[in-house]
Image (cartoon, rainbow, N blue to C red):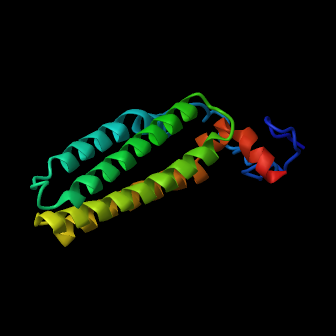
Amino acid sequence: MPQCPHCQTSYEVEQHLCTTCGYDLRKKDIKGIGGWLLWLCIMLTIIDPLIMLWNGYLITEMRYDLRDIPVVFFLQLFALLLLIINIILSMLAGGRLWLKMKRVITYCKKVLIASLCIQFIIIILVIIMGYLIGAPITIRDIVNDIGAIVIGFGIWYWYLTESVRVKNTFYSEFAKKAN
């Protein structure tokens, strides 16, 4: 009987995944930081932080008279603090993924969940600030923002869970879970 190249467990010839470590026995060459995994690293370390910086700029550009509505200033500061936390988490996740650190897949999934929650809170803060200063925020804008956030989260979370490249690159993490 053939053996899994990672954990040396015997398997049936028609078997596609190793039952011990989750290694894809059909595609042994898909491994390492490349393809969509490389794109995820770039997204987490460069593109997402730039988008969040742009969102922070847009939040600070909300025009209002501070004397009339002082609470908006504090809402802006809170939203900016959340954006900074999100930027740091995103860059740490991308860097850890690139360096193939231990338990990085679990860490990245937690960062994706935290980022999803932070972005929902920021949307709520922007809605409140817009209401307080009389800025028109349409339901369409809100739905578009929420839709983009949820779809992005769903795609990357699914990728980290189901990808052959992720399983082959970080197989030791999956082997520990199986045992």
**Is 126 placed left or right of 85 in the picture?**
left
- Of the pair 47 and 6, the residue shown nearer to us: 47
Q: Where in the figure is residue 29, as x and y percent of width and height?
A: 63, 33
Q: Residue at x 51, y 35 (%)?
A: 92
**Is 42 placed left or right of 163 in the picture?**
left
Quarter location, residue 48:
top left
Above or below, 42 against 179 in this view is above
Q: Where in the figure is residue 123, as x and y percent of width and height?
A: 30, 61
Q: Residue at x 46, y 59 (%)?
A: 154
- Of the pair 153 and 7, the residue shown nearer to us: 153
Quarter location, residue 153:
bottom left
Q: Where in the figure is residue 113, as x and y percent of width and height?
A: 51, 56
Above or below, 96 against 26 in this view is above
Residue 19 in view here: no
**Where's the N terminus, which quadrant?**
top right
Q: Residue at x 49, y 54 (%)?
A: 114
Q: Where in the figure is residue 22, as x and y percent of width and height?
A: 73, 48
